[in-house]
Amino acid sequence: MGIEINNTPNLGISDTQGNKTSETKKVDKDAQGTAAAQSQNNPAATDSVHLTASARQLSELENRLEKIPEVDSNRVEAIKKAIANGEYKIDAERIATKLTNLESLLPR
């Protein structure tokens, strides 16, 4: 049983294993026939996508970010070593200032 929204059949019907149901296969077959008929009527029609400069830049930045590790393992090792050697200094004043700054950013 398919779901229709504004008389448009749901093209994504599948069973629990992700296999298309017979209803979806029929809709897909009908859609392929329609697409073939449309391409015969207008063979020069093609789809295209144009990205803006900012979209390209965003995509580039996303790719760069994926390559950066989430944890700076060198810094973690340096801190571990400083703690083990008793050289790690805690600046309570700085921590208190950062906490109050953070609290001022929270919604009230």
Image: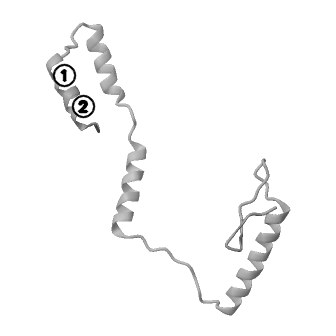
* Amino acid type, callout 2: Glu
* Residue located 59% across and 86% down the image: 45
Outermost residue to the right: 22
Residue 91 picture location, percent across and down: 17, 17
Residue 103, labelled with which disc?
2
**Closer to the camera, 106 or 56?**
106
Mark 1 or mark 2, which is nearer the start of the sequence?
A: 1
Q: Residues within 10 Å of mark 1 (few under 14, many from 20)?
A: few
**Residue at 40 percent of width and 52 percent of height:** 62
Drawn side of residue 95 relative to residue 80, left or right? left
- Considering every residue shown, the one lying at the far left of the view is 93
Amino acid type at image mark 1: Ala
65 and 106: which one is in front? 106
Q: Residue at x 82, y 61 (%)?
A: 1
> Which of the two residues, 38 or 62, is positioned nearer the viewer here?
38
Q: Secondary structure at mark 2?
A: helix
Image quadrant containing the C terminus = top left
Q: Quadrant of residue 42?
A: bottom right
Judging by the rendered image, the residue that carries numbered circle 1 is 96
Q: Where residue 19 sits in the image (x, y, percent)?
A: 79, 54
For mark 1, give the secondary structure. Answer: helix
Between the residue at mark 2 and the residue at mark 1, the CA separation in whole angstroms equals: 11 Å
